Amino acid sequence: MDSLNTLNVFVSVAETRSFVATARLMGVSASAIGKSIVRLEERFGVRLFNRSTRSVTLTEEGHRFLERSQRILAEIEAAEAEFSQTSTLPRGRLKISLPLVSDPFIPTLARFRIAYPSIELDLTFDDRRVEVIEEGYDAVLRSGELPDSSLTARHLGDYQMILAGAPDYFQRHGIPEQPTDLLRHTCIQFRFPNTGKLQVWPIRRNDQELDLQLPTSVVCNNLEARVGFAVQGVGIAYLPDFAIRQWLDCGKLVSVLTDCSETGTFQIMWPSGKHPSPKLRVFIDFLKEQLFPAA
């Protein structure tokens, strides 16, 4: 077990490129991590890392040893997952990063917790791009294409971004028949918290993108506020269909300019080279079955 712990330390330092980050993840001091690496280097008689005051990088020998270490740890994780499936229910803490979403994710997460009471959920709702390995997340749920060679991704499902407003708003202001009509409407826009930029609406006519300076009548930095303003008849918002399905079904919101829509995708990602643990596997399967059963 001491050897396995040392391998875990080595792989973590290689992935985070930091003794301090590894120490934080493992709950020990940075000096203890450093001593563990020194003992490993002395045991093999090679230098595994180049160290400086600013960075920690793998040597050529370190790269070779990392490949072997990851394979060994992956096999052990696979064996543990296989045997734990047959012996016990999934249990333990799951640290998950999710975007700033509410319905239908919150009710789904609540049902998951009830279905798996032995799994503790540590959830962070944040649109920033987290450092999965360095910050100790088991997985992250994100929309869009997020290439990252250090992560393995599983596609959960797709959704549609649509322009929608309340019937009483359109009674007062008219229904936009063409994209340029939006210039005289109240537009409820989204500002990305991380960049401060406004979300771009896919304004098209005859399959051609139009560069329109839409009114910034109302600007919000979260989804719930935009949905709420749209339902209350404030104006038109660009929203994901999963967040407004109930309002579309009951007629409190209607979609307009249906050509101006885009398809989005949800993915769940975890560190590469690792088999999903039983607790993570049931979490992924539950989300997919509940949120995107037809995907």
Image: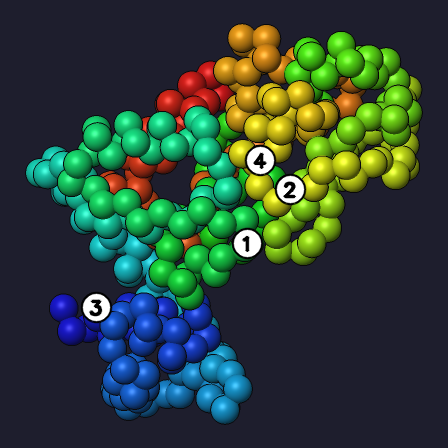
Q: Nearer the viewer, residue 264 or 33?
A: 264
- Locate the N terminus by quadrant: bottom left
| Viewer-nearest of discs 3 and 2 | 2
Name the residue type under label 4. Answer: Ala
Q: Residue furthest left?
A: 87
Name the mark on residue 128. Answer: 1
Percent x, y of residue 126:
49, 50
Alpha carbon distance from label 4 to label 3: 48 Å
Name the residue type under label 1. Answer: Arg
Q: Nearer the viewer, residue 148 or 108?
A: 108
Q: Quadrant of residue 281?
A: top left
Q: Earlier in the sequence, mark 1 or mark 2?
A: 1
Q: Which residue is mark 2?
A: 220
Residue 2 horizontal side relative to residue 75, left or right: left
Q: Secondary structure at mark 3?
A: helix
Q: Which residue is mark 4?
A: 225
